[in-house]
Amino acid sequence: MTEDEIRPAAEADVPAVKAVTDAAYHLYVERIGVVPAPMEADHAADVAEGKVFVTGDPVNGLVVVEPRPDHLLLDSIAVHPDAHGRGVGRRLLHFVDAHARALGLREVRLYTNAMMWENQKIYPKYGYEVVERRVDGPYDRIHYRKPLD
């Protein structure tokens, strides 16, 4: 696998999926006061269901996506801190758009915690617009959508 290739995660990738997710999200635990949902996900089940796509060798980035009837939900994106600034996140976001189109879906949706202010600067640069802010259990989330051409 080349460094830029994005592929479906395999069962053997589950430990790397967990490690990259934990590394990407752990800094938010103290800031938001709860463990971010991606850190508590059932990574093995998500991989088995074909929801996880990874990049890097070793894995340094991933997305968890879930097709819905009228959109693709970007449930999680994670880039290992050691890979920041190398375009991994950008490639993953472009992949999500292409994957949605390949599935015949015309929109991508995602949400981020309101306390993850870094993300609120990133997503609009990639065409995402705020839909609403809503509290879901212990999470104060900002919901985004991106219509696809």
Image (cartoon, rainbow, N blue to C red):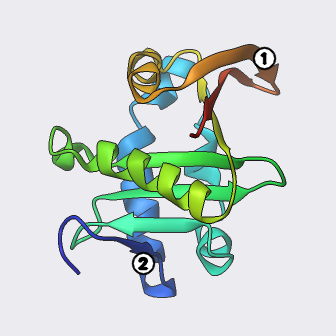
Which quadrant of the view contains residue 119? top left
- Front-most of 145 and 45? 145
Q: Does 26 appear above or below 79?
A: above
Coordinates of residue 48 in the picture (x, y in percent) = 64, 80
Mark 2 surroundings within 10 Å by alpha-carbon count, few (fewer than 14), some (14 through 19), many (20 or more)? some
Coordinates of residue 52 in the picture (x, y in percent) = 54, 66
Q: Amino acid at mark 1?
A: Arg
Q: Where is the C terminus found, in terms of image quarters?
A: top right
What is the C-alpha distance between the residues marked 1 and 2? 33 Å
Earlier-in-chain disc, 1 versus 2: 2
Residue that badge 1 annotates: 134
- Element under label 1? strand
- Element under label 2? helix
Which quadrant of the view contains residue 56? bottom left
Side (left or right) of 87 relative to 42: left
Residue 30: which numbered mark, if any?
none
Coordinates of residue 143 in the picture (x, y in percent) = 68, 24
Which quadrant of the view contains residue 147? top right
Residue that badge 2 annotates: 13
Residue that appears at 79% across and 54% down: 68
Q: Where is the N terminus found, in terms of image quarters?
A: bottom left
Q: Is residue 22 visible?
A: no
Side (left or right) of 142 relative to 21: right
Mark 1 surroundings within 10 Å by alpha-carbon count, few (fewer than 14), some (14 through 19), many (20 or more)? some
